[in-house]
Image (tube, rainbow, N blue to C red):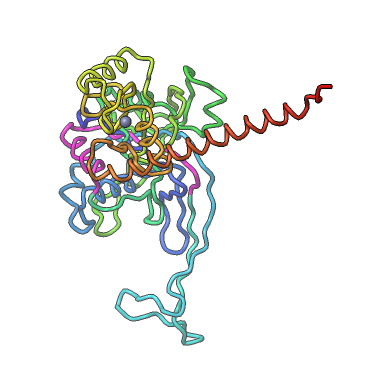
Amino acid sequence: MNGSGNTIFLRLSGLMQSWGTSSQFQIRRTDGYPSKSGVLGLLLCAMGVSRADSSRELEALRPLVMGVRVDRAGDSDWDYQTAGAKIGIRSADGKIKVTDSTGEFETLLSRRQYLYDASFLVALQGPTEVIQACSDALEDPVWPVFLGRKSCIPSEPILTGTGDFHDIHQALSSIPWQGRPGEIGRFGEGFEVTLKAYIEHTDLSTPPPIDVRIVHDVPRTFGFHSHDARSVISDTVIAPVLMPPRRVAPGSRTRRVDYSSAQWREARLIRLESDDYLCVFCKSEAREVHHVTYENVGEETNADLRSLCRICHDACTMLEYGRDLRLRRVDPSAPEQRGEILAQITKILSERRMGRRRELLETSRLTRSDLSDVAPAG
Ligand SMILES: [Zn+2]
């Protein structure tokens, strides 16, 4: 999706996340859903803006209205963490802290809470140019982005898309639910689910509903921790259920060729005719057409295809086996691949000769044993 519209969607999903708004020092809790300070911090990272001089960007980001949809709440658990054991922790005055009773370097102990296997859909709404800037930054982040703490790595791209929506509620209802595959399977496609959502209440003309929560998570500045309050309403949204796409590594996506389609039949014919029905490798009669790239599956151009005879095609296909070629394939008209293809053809031919010899041998044995079964006459 291109970055145009008043709303941007962020997918915050990962093995671990932690969105603390209330804790300090040794015990660090996470809230059950992403905080505004965490999300704005993530955007600043993507923009490559350091916390110390983020005031200009923050001024633009703070007014964005935020809504969070809980697609998977995840489980929460605590991690007991030590830092600086035997090497010490530097205190504010620059000295290394020492335990009075033992004289040894002090170890910093903390208990940190995390959400495991959670997935949230965040929508931010505001002026188009701010949304565009966020989208651009997430498309190509300057610094690594993380889910609340640096150790919490996103498990998929954060930028989910942008669009124009009447309000946050409508926006959060537009994107398919990301449940666990098993959960989605129980519903099936075409169904809808009701999901929990936390939506910022900004309409000051109406009194906030009863279940409003005041959250102090709107950063005034990232230089030192100081936050403004906002009102967050616990709500629900209805989201469509869509079967998840099969996961494949980026770049390895090979769309299946529909060999029965009229488009493929035509692309194939054009290639064969422009090659005069001759194999581009050995110039014998060509009846097959080979892809040198899968980049344009469904709308192949002549440059994506090569006419081949059966054996040369087999050789090219066999060379592709087990190789991580991604979209680019073996190209029989590339001079640098000629030697390799020729060696493969020789191998196929010698295997076929061996096969044929074995076949003949089997037949002759059979013939002999057949003969021996025949009782001698007389
Ligand atoms: Zn050939």
Instruction: State the image coordinates of residue 280 (x, y, percent, origin top left).
Output: 25, 30
* 77 shown above or below 178: below
**In the displayed structure, would residue 324 be above or below residue 287?**
below
Closest to the observer: 338 or 268?
338
Q: Position of residue 233 (x, y in %)?
A: 40, 33
Q: Residue furthest right?
A: 378
Image quarter in which the N terminus is found: top left
Which residue, as the protein is rendered here, is positioned at the far front?
A: 378
Quarter where residue 171 is shown? top left
In magenta segment, residue 90: no
**Quadrant in which the C terminus appears:** top right
For ligand 1, give the image quadrant: top left
Measuring 38% from the left and 36% from the top, which residue is drawn there?
Answer: 315
Q: Nearer the viewer, residue 127 or 261?
A: 261
Residue 249 x, y percent position in the rendering: 39, 41
Q: Position of residue 186 (x, y in %)?
A: 57, 25
Relative to 239, is 357 on the left or the right?
Answer: right
Q: In terms of image quadrants, where is residue 210? A: top left
Q: So how many labels did they put on this image?
A: 0
* Nearest to the observer: residue 171 or residue 300: 300
Question: Which residue appears at 36% of the width and 31% of the height?
Answer: 313
Q: Is residue 116 found left or right of 172 in the rendered image?
A: right
Residue beneath the point at 21% across and 35% down: 131
Q: Nearer the viewer, residue 345 or 208?
A: 345
Bounds of the magenta span? 115-141
Asked whether 139 falls inside the magenta stretch, the response is yes
Is residue 40 left or right of 101 when viewed as pictured? Answer: left
